[in-house]
Image: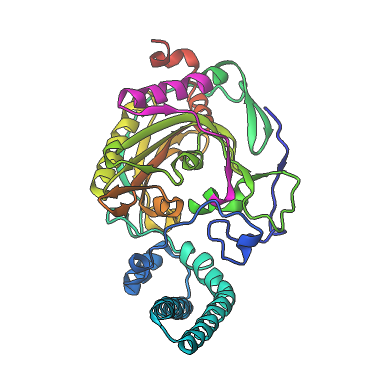
Amino acid sequence: MLRTRLLHCLSRRSYSSALYITGDKAKEQYAPLVPYLDFQAKLSDLEKLRQNLNLRRYQLDFEDLKHQRDLYRSIELRKRDIEARRVELKEKIKESKSEDKIKQLKMQATLARDDLKNLKESSYAIADKFVAGTFLAIPNELHERTPADQEEVLYERSTSREGSAIGDQWLEKYDSTCFYMTGDAALMDLFLPMNCAGLLQDAGFVLFSNPDFVRSVLVEAAREDPESIYLINEEVDLEHKLNLLHLCGGGSMLSFLGYLTKLSVFPTALPLRLVAIGKQYFYGKTQTSAVQMMTATQQAPEAVQIFDETIELYKKFYDQLELSYRLVQVPAHHLETSEAMRVDVEIYSPRAKGFVKVGNVCYYSDFISKRIAFNYHEGKVQKFPHLVSGTVLKAANLIEVLLQHGICYKDLKFLNQ
């Protein structure tokens, strides 16, 4: 295992937004991205938002939200009025013939400029609290197929395979987050992801090679918990630098976002179908080889269709294994805040005496696209693609269950064809 200089900061570090940077911070911080803030779509129907949050069991002070929204809106309207007044004064100055009148108008323009400057400076804290602290933290809207309370088993396959557990003879534990693989486990770790990615390539997916590292702006855009991902020790002032470097692995959803960020594509380029083989590194979880898919479409119906087609591809891969597995529609309160809908792949583990998760497929609607400015245009109208992404397999989790069932590399005939 390559040992990297990592730094994981817990409660010692107070996280500020790297995704939304106000003008006062822009003097010291570079803003690589300006997210699309769709206040109308998110806040026009507060009752619908309340229902969404209740189903997710997500805590939000609605009275405070409305107060922040009204205060932010009033300041923005005031800025707009002053800007309009400055434009009006500029035109009057051009048209005026009287020196005294021009002098008077210029004094009014100076006062308007100073008023605008003072208003902007006083509004930074309000904008930071509302946009970065509240608005960007609002979860994605739920898809209608997401269950309200209980998970739904969409598909289940049972097998009667009997085999003696091989144990951990090919797994050398390092600590709770990683282990070495040798022998058959190492062979499966190499060839299972290759077979899986090949299956998706046959279905039209393009093989990608993604970076192992992402910046904080993308972690925040995807609504991942920054404390769940390793920080790289860049020997910088962590208390003041916002856009830090994280180790996530090239087999994670985050690793695709750098390619998609600020990308403007022709509508004819959609849908995109991408797949990558790489590692996944998350704090407190076992590092693993993984196969990650990512698709982007113009509209929601097409994205949901690809979501369903992807589930069929998952079945095609897992049906090759002599294992009991199932596909489970995840209820609202178990979704991540960026997810509108998710289906998990679970395989039966004799050791756990139950099903363990080895993969998933998630529908994000245009939630992440708006935050990373991934867009296309229809005429002069800017629109944002709908994303579907998922971990087709987590090799470490899958191999551990295969060994529990007594399955060796030679038993996986489809890898030897």
Give the residues drawn in magenta, as a range: 188-217
Q: Is residue 208 visible to us here?
A: yes
Q: Where is residue 207 in the image (x, y as percent from the top left)?
A: 42, 26
Quarter containing the N terminus: top right
Residue occupying image coordinates x 67% and y 61%: 14
Q: How many labels does the image show?
A: 0
Q: Foreground: 45 or 355?
A: 45
Residue at point 34%, 68% (across, down): 40
The magenta stretch spans residue 275: no
Look at the image and tell me whether residue 361 can be seen.
Answer: no
Does 237 sit above or below residue 314? Answer: below
Residue 283 image point, x, y percent: 62, 44
* Side of 23 relative to 371 (left or right): right
Q: In this view, does 179 lie above or below 39?
A: above
Q: Nearer the viewer, residue 169 or 132?
A: 132
Give residue 249's position: percent from left, percent from top.
Answer: 56, 36
Q: In which quarter of the image is the C terminus?
A: top left
Q: In this view, does 230 lie above or below 26?
A: above
* Residue 211 highlighted magenta (yes or no): yes
